[in-house]
């Protein structure tokens, strides 16, 4: 065990040295992914959240999180080393107004509707991080890549490794030549891997195949591939307009000012949404972080979208924070019941599970936030690990 500990210590201090290098010689690791005019969320050099939250993290906390990733943290709830998943075999196409959804894991979702096959933040790699070093998946992808139908549209929300997996994107590009839509600057990262993407600003859109159209919409996050290139590329959510109701993909996001879900819903009725619920706890009792919504704030996102049928994502695949493996979906179900909602409307499905989304209907009444707040204050959820 001693040689292993020595090797891990060496790796850790190398990582710390890289952090220090980024602060004293940012030109070495910095990358300029985008050049363009100043806007309400771009200062000419870097993007920012227009509600004023810079999502800054101190060097001490960054090093602590890095230490925990390398050496582990005995105070965290244990995760399973492996979670069994039965891969699905989706059909080639879904037509006739039907919508079929398969959760592949983390933020990767296959949506099939109106003859269009849509894939979000595709990740088939075993680890997510630079040079193959990073969190390792605990469950195999819910669809084997070989069983994946031809993909028409790929949505890439930002450039973090657990959302922009260049090896997977290269395989998809070489096989299917899909339309890849991403926010500004991320196309430059993908171009380095031989992948062509269409990069758009918030509010901009592009037409796709079979009558589908994509609009890049606001979210609350940040981006980076290294240490010094923070927020050189933009982050986003997406609305895919389809003949029988829109699909919304939140990407990776915190709540921020909470106004952006309604902005997305203003583009038309949302039939189905994929909303993150995990990686929200970095300190004991934390219910959300600036860049990640937990179940409580995910319900507010869902409400702002008009309370469509929704899938809970961004949990149970890669360990990125300190909540327990099953804590996010357990919290979500309990909080929805506290708010008087049917948990089946915003559900945490199993990896590899396919399900049909019903046609658009009238949204249910707004959640009872007073009851939800009472549940949290009574310690029924924030004390969960």
Image: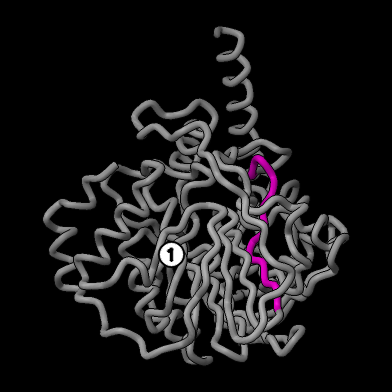
Q: Which residues are magenta?
A: 116-128
Where in the figure is residue 202, as x and y percent of width and height?
60, 81
Q: Residue at x 40, y 69 (%)?
A: 255
Specify whether residue 122 is painted magenta.
Answer: yes
- Decide if residue 46 is in sight here: no
Q: Quadrant of the C terminus?
A: top left
Q: Quadrant of the N terminus?
A: top right
- Residue 310 relative to residue 37: left or right: left
Where in the figure is residue 147, as x and y percent of width and height?
74, 55
Q: Residue at x 39, y 74 (%)?
A: 302
- Decide if residue 356 is in sight here: yes
- Residue 327 relative to residue 174: left or right: left
Which residue is at the front of the view, 355 or 124?
Answer: 355
Specify whether residue 94 is painted magenta.
Answer: no
Which residue is at the front of the view, 109 or 88?
Answer: 88
Task: State the predominant SS element of the stretch in magenta.
Answer: loop
Which residue is at the front of the view, 295 or 247?
Answer: 247
Q: Residue at x 36, y 68 (%)?
A: 344
Figure check: 339 above or below 143: below
Figure check: 51 above or below 315: below
Figure check: 61 above or below 259: above
Quadrant of res 332: bottom left
Residue to which mark 1 is pinned:
254
SS at mark 1? loop
């Amino acid at each position: 065990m001693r040689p292993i500990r020595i090797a891990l210590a060496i790796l850790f201090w190398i990582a710390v040295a890289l952090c220090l290098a980024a602060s004293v010689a940012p030109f070495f690791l910095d990358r300029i992914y985008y050049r363009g005019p100043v806007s309400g969320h771009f200062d000419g050099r870097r993007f920012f959240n227009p509600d004023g939250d810079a999502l800054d993290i101190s060097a001490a906390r960054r090093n602590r999180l890095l230490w925990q990733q390398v050496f582990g943290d005995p105070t965290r709830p244990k995760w399973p080393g492996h979670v069994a998943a039965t891969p699905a075999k989706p059909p080639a196409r879904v037509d006739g107004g039907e919508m079929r959804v398969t959760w592949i894991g983390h933020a990767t979702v296959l949506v099939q509707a109106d003859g269009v096959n849509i894939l979000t933040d595709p990740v088939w790699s075993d680890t997510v991080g630079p040079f193959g070093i990073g969190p390792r998946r605990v469950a195999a992808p819910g669809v084997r890549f070989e069983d994946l139908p031809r993909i028409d549209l790929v949505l890439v929300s930002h450039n973090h490794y657990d959302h922009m997996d260049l090896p997977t994107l290269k395989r998809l590009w070489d096989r299917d030549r899909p339309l890849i839509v991403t926010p500004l600057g991320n196309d430059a990262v993908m171009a380095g891997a031989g992948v062509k993407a269409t990069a758009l600003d918030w509010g901009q859109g592009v037409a796709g195949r079979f009558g589908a159209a994509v609009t890049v919409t606001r979210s609350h996050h940040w981006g980076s591939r290294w240490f010094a290139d923070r927020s050189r590329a933009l982050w986003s959510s997406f609305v895919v307009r389809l003949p029988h109701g829109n699909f919304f993909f939140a990407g990776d996001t915190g709540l921020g000012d909470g106004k952006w879900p309604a902005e997305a819903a203003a583009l038309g009725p949302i039939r189905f949404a994929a909303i993150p619920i995990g990686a929200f706890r970095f300190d004991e009792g934390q219910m959300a972080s600036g860049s990640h919504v937990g179940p409580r704030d995910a319900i507010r996102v869902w409400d702002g979208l008009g309370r469509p049928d929704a899938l809970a994502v961004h949990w149970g695949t890669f360990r990125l924070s300190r909540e327990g493996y099953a804590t996010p979906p357990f919290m979500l179900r309990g909080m929805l019941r506290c708010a008087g909602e049917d948990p089946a409307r915003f559900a945490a499905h199993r990896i590899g599970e396919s399900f049909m989304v019903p046609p658009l209907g009238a949204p249910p009444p707004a959640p009872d936030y007073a009851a939800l707040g009472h549940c949290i204050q009574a310690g029924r959820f924030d004390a969960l690990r």
